[in-house]
Image (spheres, helix red, strand yellow):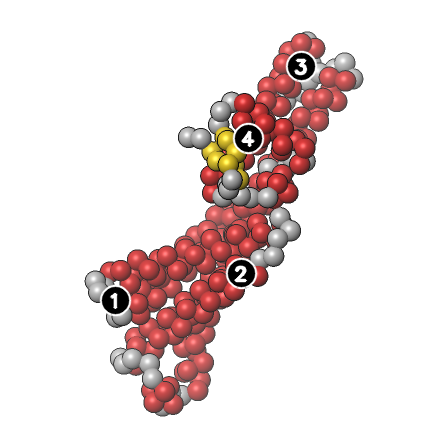
């Protein structure tokens, strides 16, 4: 396993463990304000997943050139809710009582600081780990696209030089080289079109600039893919944007 894969795996494991910790604390707090109690834990799980989702979404919005201010506001509010819940539940576990001004006033400052770092700051760490994991996922995708394009260029250069080669570097006939190169291009085109469909399923009104950047193609190529998908009957245009036909 390569170093980058180990780092990504470690990041995911760390994030899942931290999410479990904060979800239990947040769920314990919310369960006291709702009946049945288990809905509180369900809501807590939603809050923790939202932290990760919003973090990933902000990265995509920034890359598309849009203003992520709304998503940042919601993310900060979500992290605050999680942090407050962690502090409240941590206080109850340590002191055996609900948090209050009177209870806080009676705490030793050092113990209060330790409790705050051991509870409230966990939510900040979750936010940071979400950013790291999201960056790793995006970097891995960019690296995969670069490797694929490098392989295509290598095949094209070998064909142009009259010395076509396969992936192992062995020469083979021109026709076979052309066929393999075309297969790679077709595969890349299909993958890009499937990515387009996934994006449009999530939001039919995504701007063209964002779609082109998300699939790693120029805007003109992206429009060509859309026309191809429309001819295949897989999408259709409506007043809200582009609808995917399942």
- Residue 201, percent from left and from top: 47, 39
- Residue 170, percent from left and from top: 67, 16
Q: In the figure, is residue 193 to the left or right of 96?
A: right
SS label for mark 3: helix
User: Going 43% across and 56% down the picture, which residue do you hit?
Assistant: 50
| Alpha carbon separation for disc pair 1 and 4 | 45 Å
Of residues 214 and 173, the one nearer the viewer is 214
**Label 1: few (<14), some or many (≥20) within 10 Å?**
few
- Residue 125, percent from left and from top: 49, 64
| Alpha carbon separation for disc pair 3 and 4 | 22 Å
**Above or below for 222 versus 72:** above
**Label 4: few (<14), some or many (≥20) within 10 Å?**
some
| Alpha carbon separation for disc pair 3 and 1 | 65 Å
User: Going 33% across and 87% down the picture, which residue do you hit?
Assistant: 103
Of residues 22 and 62, the one nearer the viewer is 62
Which residue is label 3 attached to? 178
> Quick one: label 1 or label 4, which is nearer the N terminus?
1
**Above or below for 113 versus 68:** below
Residue 140 visible in rendering: no
Which residue is label 2 attached to? 70
Q: Nearer the viewer, mark 3 or mark 4?
A: 4
Which residue is label 1 attached to? 34
Q: In the figure, is residue 219 to the left or right of 10?
A: right
Which residue is label 4 attached to? 193
> Quick one: label 3 or label 4, which is nearer the N terminus?
3
SS label for mark 2: helix
- Residue 100 occupies quadrant: bottom left
SS label for mark 1: loop
């Amino acid at each position: 396993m390569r170093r980058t894969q180990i780092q990504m795996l470690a990041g995911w494991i760390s994030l899942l463990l931290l999410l479990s910790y904060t979800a239990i604390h947040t769920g314990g707090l919310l369960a006291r304000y709702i009946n049945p109690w288990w809905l509180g834990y369900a809501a807590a799980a939603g809050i923790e997943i939202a932290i990760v989702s919003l973090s990933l979404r902000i990265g995509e919005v920034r890359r598309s050139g849009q203003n992520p201010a709304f998503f940042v506001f919601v993310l900060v509010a979500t992290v605050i809710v999680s942090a407050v819940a962690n502090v409240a539940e941590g206080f109850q576990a340590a002191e055996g009582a609900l948090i209050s001004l009177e209870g806080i006033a009676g705490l030793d400052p050092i113990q209060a600081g330790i409790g705050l770092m051991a509870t409230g700051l966990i939510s900040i760490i979750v936010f940071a780990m979400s950013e790291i994991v999201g960056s790793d996922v995006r970097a891995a995708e960019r690296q995969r696209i670069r490797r694929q394009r490098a392989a295509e260029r290598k095949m094209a250069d070998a064909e142009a030089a009259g010395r076509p080669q396969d992936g192992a570097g062995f020469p083979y006939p021109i026709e076979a080289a052309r066929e393999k190169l075309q297969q790679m291009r077709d595969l890349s085109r299909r993958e890009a079109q499937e990515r387009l469909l996934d994006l449009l399923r999530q939001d039919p009104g995504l701007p063209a600039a964002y779609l082109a950047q998300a699939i790693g193609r120029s805007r003109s190529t992206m429009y060509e893919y859309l026309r191809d998908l429309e001819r295949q009957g897989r999408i259709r245009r409506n007043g809200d944007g582009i609808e995917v036909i399942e």
